[in-house]
Image (cartoon, rainbow, N blue to C red):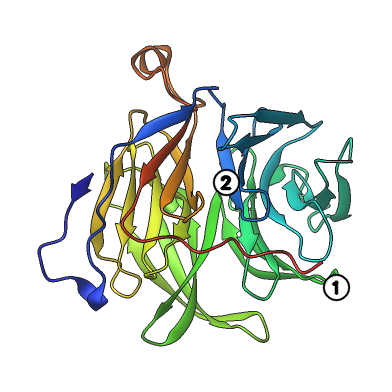
Amino acid sequence: MENLSDGAPAADHLGPVCGPVHCVWEGGAELGEGLLWSMREQALYWVDILGCRLHRLDLTTGALREWTFAETISALAERTGAPGLIVTLRRGFALFDPATDSEPRYLHQPEPELPGNRFNDGKCDAQGRFWAGSMDFACEVPTGALYRYDPDGQCTRHDEGFVVTNGPTWAMDSGGLCLYFNDTLQGSTYRYDVDPAAGTLSNKQLWHRMAPGDGLPDGMTTDALGRVWIAHWGSACVSCHDPVTARELGRVLLPTSHVTTCTFGGPDLHTLFITTARTGLTPEQLAAEPLAGGLFAVSVDSPGLPANLFGG
């Protein structure tokens, strides 16, 4: 762990203290993403987007299961009132119960006019609404958007004009609750003011831009102190930031370049799990990074927050 704090922590948030990084799964995902720690199952879920697979790891027994789909699967959340998951497939939102279903069941496809798009990252807010972003599958044109899917089936588009979307995550700043969302190819993280009751966004601002050569912002999460953790695509690390100033407080270094997302899990939520990818690496890079596409874990000073459940 490289601690970048200078001894005067911004917004009373201390620099993180982490243990050693270790690889808990060496399966070599093409594009690992979609991490979810299930509190009720005490198990970790994640996906390989380009491999069209969902994985589940029981940390107590080490048992690993996987499901293969006919299309990409990119993000997931557990349901409040029923077993199983809400997931994003290539074209939108769907339900899937790993215990009983042979394939997912679509709920809503918000972009029938954009066959070149696919959904990417997403997660639920505290009110049980699922937020997810779409993107251009070829990562070339700004056809991506940010959506909110409600338990009653209403789907709202909140922002658009992105090539590649990642996030969201939530934290408090001096003005109240904020949503953070990544415009990945621009290297930019935006913050929006949130009205929690209405589920609306306002006051979009550039919160952080990654320095040239430091990779691109991918998936992210928030810990119990409100610090925002961001995976760096192309820069072999996860950085931790003050939610108000965006100042970097420290980073976790990984043994592979393309770091895709992170989430907190384990019985006490003190473990940061991190996914990575093989796609986009040259043969020379793959030879030098044998753990590319693996799932990693590191202990952190502050616990994370339990994943929010989908209200439907």
Q: Is residue 113 above or below residue 287?
A: below
Q: Which mark is residue 39?
A: none
Q: Is residue 188 above or below residue 278?
A: below
Horizontal relation, residue 239 to residue 83: left or right: left
Point out residue 70 in the picture as x, y percentages from the top left corner. 82, 31
Disc 2 residue crowd, few under 14, some 14–19, many 20+, Cα 10 Å: many
Q: Which mark is residue 35?
A: 2
- Residue at 50% from the left image edge and 64% from the top image edge: 305
Q: Does the rendering let one see residue 91? A: yes
Horizontal relation, residue 63 to residue 89: left or right: left
Residue at the extreme left of the image, as rendered: 7
- Residue at 46% from the left image edge and 44% from the top image edge: 273
Residue at the extreme front of the image, as rendered: 61
Q: Is residue 228 above or below residue 46?
A: below
Q: Amino acid at mark 1?
A: Asp
> Which numbered disc, 2 or 1, marks the residue closer to the eye?
2
Disc 1 residue crowd, few under 14, some 14–19, many 20+, Cα 10 Å: few
Where disc 2 sits, the SS reads strand
In which quadrant of the rendered view does residue 154 lie? Answer: bottom right
Q: Amino acid at mark 2?
A: Leu
Horizontal relation, residue 7 to residue 303: left or right: left
Q: Earlier in the sequence, mark 2 or mark 1?
A: 2
